[in-house]
Amino acid sequence: MAGLSFEEQVYWTLIDLANALLTGTFIGGYYAILSIGLALSFGVMRLVNLAHGEFLIVGAYISAVILQVVNIPAFFVLFIVVPIMFGIGYGLQRFLLNRVSVQAMERRGMSSNFGLMAPILVTFGLSIFISHGLLAIFASDAMSINNSLAFSAIRITSDLSVSTLRFIFFLFAIVLLIALFLFLRHSATGRAIRATSDNPTYATLMGINTEHVFAVALGISLAIGGVAGFMIGMTRTFQPFDGPQFILIAFGVVIIGGMNSIVGSLVGGVLLGIVQVLAGTYFGPSAQLVGGYMLVLAVLAFFREGLFSR
Amino acid sequence: MSTWGSRGNLSAKPGRDGRYPILTVEKLSAWYGELRALQGISFSANAGEVVSVIGANGAGKSTLLRAMTGMMNLGKRAHIEGRIECQGRRLDRLRTEKIIEGGVTMVPEGRMLFSRMSVEENLLVGAHIPRARDGIKDRLAGIFEFFPRLAERRTQSVSQMSGGEQQMVASGRALMSDPAVILFDELSLGLAPIIVDDIYDKVRQINERGVTCLVIEQDMRRALEVANHVLVMLEGDIVLDGSPDDLSREEITNAYFGTRPEGVA
């Protein structure tokens, strides 16, 4: 800031800070959508879905392919992607993961610890299968969803602006998280999901088909993953092996916010977003990831189960 | 005042004594792996009865309840053989949710409430089965009328409630499924005697409203006070079956502890 007056230096420092806070906050909404599915599958099934990142990329590919084939406004593709991803999640849990769940292992006379490990191994295998499957189908060429909003910005002042897409996605996140909260709180299926999350054995005694509830929960998890995949495709290019970088973000958000909290996902996303952008602004782009994961470590050190875990 | 247990005698036919057998258990055996925990027991319960199942620790009482609610169908780990019928419908091969749908529900030992949910949410989860969703608001209002304390605390987390209040939630939650038969497991466990008196009073009132009750209890005095049919279990077998009015206290005590009456070789 050489050559600037003191007032100008203060002004630009504040503008940098405001830009970082705004951008970080709006990125946080996007991060929350990336992560809520992971939090939901862990909260309900105690499933650490290591294929979560790959499923986001699947959502991105499905969105991109549909929009290449069908001439509809980009956001309308969600009406197709979300049900498809729900179906994939439901089927995956019902016909594969339920067979290796804690309950299934106990029925076979095996240790419940094996029931915790087996689904993790299965999802690890799935992550490899999915990324190589995508490579076989789409090759390694980068894809993206063409849209007119990619370079659009909302100008707040002459020196302060935010990406239009990030702003829309933030609103999306708020609406989606409120909808999910109301669904879990006030619908019979939502209550069954929460009861099963609390204790599957007690839930069974209430007449709840926990295998169906687990499948619905993973269906919802991947349906939200479909939305996240669409967001990925709208904001950047993606390739078959991009999944791991997104699961790292999702793990960060879930660790910060807490494993079973919807509000925690949003707050975790916003905090991670702000810290990453602040680190990038003041210490250069290479500090973004380091800054974000220092926050994760700090939360782990002082709030072992996250800020909003109950 | 609402009447519960309306499904209680829909399809049952009167037995030899003119009453309606609502629940029939025939030659029921249960295994935990190689260990046989129930030894082929048989009994029946008439509609409107309170059946007390008493026995010492390890007598097989809780296993009987687990078997009747489908919780013993765990493949190699645990399984049952024999026949269980409720209102003429065979239950022993059904999954738990189908058994609940069939009109049998359970108030488990230790209450087993959903600790992260409120009183009202716990009650609503009790009405999850499709049959119970009709008239759910009326039934909820009926539960709050029956347990006024729960109405006062409907939005409170159950984890902040006393043991007695939690037992009310557990009983109310079972009633929300509109059952014909409720299986109560160790109601008095961990509760102060005055609270237990209240709880057993509620069991009587539930029974008077048409619900058949099967009460598992270690406290022999309370079990006999509430019952009009008593089963004494010992080492996985039923060693005494009858009306408390027809059985002497000594007979029941001897059966409970597996001792022979004096003078019998």
Image (tube, rainbow, N blue to C red):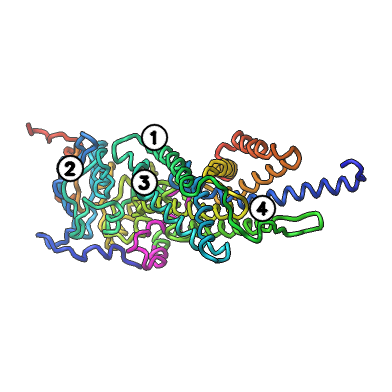
- From where the camera sits, is residue A19 visible? yes
Q: Quadrant of residue A287?
A: top right
Residue that carries the numbered disc 3 in the rendered image: A96
SS at mark 1 in the image: helix
Estimate the spatial distance between the alpha carbons at disc 4 and disc 3, rounded to whole Å: 36 Å
Q: Which one is in front in this view, the residue at disc 2 or the one at disc 4?
A: 4
Could you say where residue B66 lies in the image, as x and y percent from the top left?
A: 27, 45
Q: Identify the residue at image location x=43%, y=49%.
A: B114
Which residue matches tag 1?
Answer: A113
Stretch in magenta? B114-142
Q: CA distance from mark 3 to mark 2?
A: 32 Å
Q: Is residue A31 magenta?
A: no
Callout 4 secondary element: helix
Mark in the foreground, 3 or 2:
3
Q: CA distance from mark 1 to mark 2?
A: 29 Å
What residue did someone put label 4 on?
A26
Q: Nearer the viewer, residue A57 or B249?
A: A57
The answer to whether residue B58 is above or below residue B88 is above
Q: CA distance from mark 3 to mark 1?
A: 18 Å
What percent of the width, then of the height, locates residue B174? 35, 55
Q: Residue furthest top?
A: B265
Q: Which mark is residue B29?
A: 2
